[in-house]
Image (cartoon, rainbow, N blue to C red):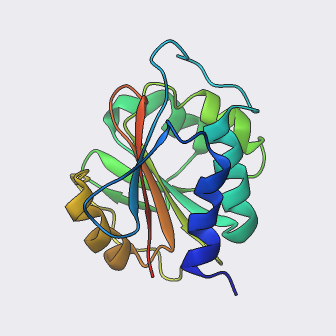
Amino acid sequence: MTTIKDLESLLQGLPRTMVHPTKEPHVYTLKRARKDRRETSDSPRRRFIAQLRTHLPAGLLWLNELQEDVAASLGDPVGKSGDTGFWSVPDDPPFDRLLDHLHVGAWALFFYAAAPEPTPDVPSPLLTESGDVTALLEKTQASAAILSWYDDVEWLVAFRP
């Protein structure tokens, strides 16, 4: 079984300048340089997601109305609330290709050891302050989450003990 210590140890593989603990336990900000507008599959944050998915392979992707084109490519959501929804994280097309389309931000990934049953309620709006993320993880029963807002430069990463 994967522990929170296992998950938080994945952050040690990132450059120190990227990882910033918040005031909340188990919640971190990951920052990338603005000049790196598009990330490649070997970028540190992409490697982090790939490693996280080896521990927590099931996931839900939260999107809002700014990501209509991405949402349309994923088909019907597994849950919806207003202009937001949850989609199962696909393995095909490759997950990396999906991440290529999320470069504008306004998304969140929730990670699970197995697909949640039933699908949790879709948060709308998605609260993105570090103090709100712990409650969000509890509400969705996710083991980890990554939240990206409107420019995809900063990610809020949280783990649920």
**Residue at left offset 65%, top offset 77%:** 113
* The C terminus - image quarter: bottom left
Task: State how many labels appear.
Answer: 0
Question: Toward the viewer: 96 or 28?
Answer: 28
Residue 84 in the figure: left or right of residue 159: left
- Give me the residue at 69% from left, 31% from top: 43
| Position of residue 18 measured from the top left corner of the image (x, y, whole percent) | 50, 38
- Residue farthest along the bottom direction in this orientation: 1
Query: Quadrant of residue 151 in the image?
Result: top left
Could you say where residue 65 lies in the image, as x and y percent from the top left? 33, 35
Reply above or below: 2 against 80. below
List the single residue furthest toward the front.
16
Q: Is residue 17 visible?
A: yes
Q: Nearer the viewer, residue 155 or 150?
A: 155
Q: Residue at x 44, y 25 (%)?
A: 104
* 106 lies left or right of 44: left
Q: Is residue 115 among what the camera can see?
A: no
Horizontal side of 127 relative to 65 (left or right) equals: left
Viewer-proximal residue among 94 and 18: 18
The answer to whether residue 3 is above or below residue 53 is below
Location of residue 99 (image quadrant): top right
Q: Quadrant of residue 81?
A: bottom left
- Percent position (x, y) of residue 85? 39, 53
Residue at 59% across, 43% down: 74
Q: Position of residue 80 (x, y in %)?
A: 36, 58
Identify the image quadrant of the N terminus. bottom right
